[in-house]
Amino acid sequence: MGEHHMFNASQLAERLSELVQIPSVNPLQAGPKSGDNGEREISEWMANRCEDLGATVTTEDILDGRHNVYARFEGTSDRSLTIDVHLDTVGVEHMSGDPFDGRIENNRVYGRGSVDTKATLAIALAVIEEMKKQGNAPKPTINLVGTISEEMGGLIGAVGYRDWLLSRHERIDQIIVAEPTMCSPVYGHKGGVGLDVTVLGHAAHSSKPHLGKNAISAAARIITAIDAEQARLQTLQPSTTVGNGSVSVTEIEGGLARNIIPDKCSLYIGRRTSPGEDPAEIQTHLEALIRSNAVPLDVQIENTYGTGSPAFYQDPSSDLVTALSHIAGTSPDTADYGSNALRYPEIASEIVVFGPGSIDQAHQAVEWIDLDQLDLAASIYRKFFNS
């Protein structure tokens, strides 16, 4: 392989900087700094770039003119590999300086999306470009997939890609879900069930509380029960290194005025699922807990993001985890955060979460990635595309 065809770290940094300069903030987290164009510009950029490199490109409108991009680069073997990069970033309103300047200094690329997760897109495209210049095709057929709406909105981009494959009766041998893992293959993380709960009371003047039904009092009993459930979950023996499930109340809203017994109180309850737990069973259990503690008041319970997700878990001794771990010189690991991997078990034989940089830098007021990590990830993909 001619060394002159290979991108060095500073050239990779320039490619990444170009992507950071394309704002793609999730519309649910948009503000004055970000604008509300979502992933539209980066989807178009990616589709054009992949076509230039010889891919067969499909764009799919998922929501409000926001497109997933599916780029297929033909390989020489019958193995299929998807690299899923989410195109949206979190919000930028709390960031210091220009969140999209993509500046390169201190051996780092700075800016929103630099680590989460435009680095993988820049690197995968650079390695494919290197191979094209050398006249080589990758061994696996590579599907470079850009998905919308990972950071917020129920992973609808990943659902779109899954359903697109199912409608074509296609299955993928291996999926790499791009997230910052310091180039350690992540083989498991929790799923979740989200419940929007509304306690229905009856208003009355606070001078005559017996004439009303206090929705906040019932909500307080629910919260106490949820806290007790969290304590119970932590006493269980975890079935895997992903750990136990957990549950928290993270939002509450209620009250009409200081002198009125509240007729409504709303809560958000988030339940993280661990491997082996069934979201439907968890929901049934939580609903019973909520309703029994609200008595004598009624409650409305709605799923926030569909029916919830089982945890993601891939056997750490599987080929994909082992191969990436070996090439990268890193140890397999689990993660605390969630990812698009939750939506892919139906369409893939093996799934791993993997990418350069640290999750500690993601979502921060200052976001950055080390050039050394870009270089390492590029060297891993060079070997993996040839294996």
Image: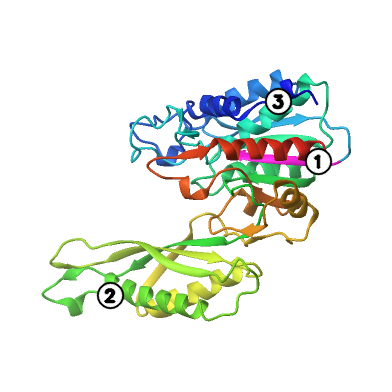
Classify the position of the C terminus by image quarter: top right
Magenta segment boundaries in residue numbering:
79-87
Q: Position of residue 47 (x, y in %)?
A: 64, 24
Amino acid under disc 1:
Ser
Q: Which mark is residue 217?
A: 2
Q: Nearer the viewer, residue 122 or 174?
A: 122
| 238 is higher (above) or lower (below) than 304 | below
Of label 2 and label 3, which has the lower sequence position? 3
Alpha-carbon span between mark 1 and mark 2: 55 Å
| 199 is higher (above) or lower (below) than 319 | below
Callout 2: SS? helix
Of label 3 and label 1, which has the lower sequence position? 3
Callout 3: SS? loop
Say left or right for 231 vs 254. right
Q: Which mark is residue 80?
A: 1
Callout 1: SS? strand
Give the quadrant of residue 63: top right
Q: Residue at x 62, y 33 (%)?
A: 121
Amino acid under disc 2:
Ser
Q: Nearer the viewer, residue 353 or 387?
A: 387
Q: Nearer the viewer, mark 1 or mark 2?
A: 1
Q: Nearer the viewer, residue 26 or 200?
A: 26
Q: Return the residue at label 3.
A: 6
- Residue 82 on the magenta span: yes
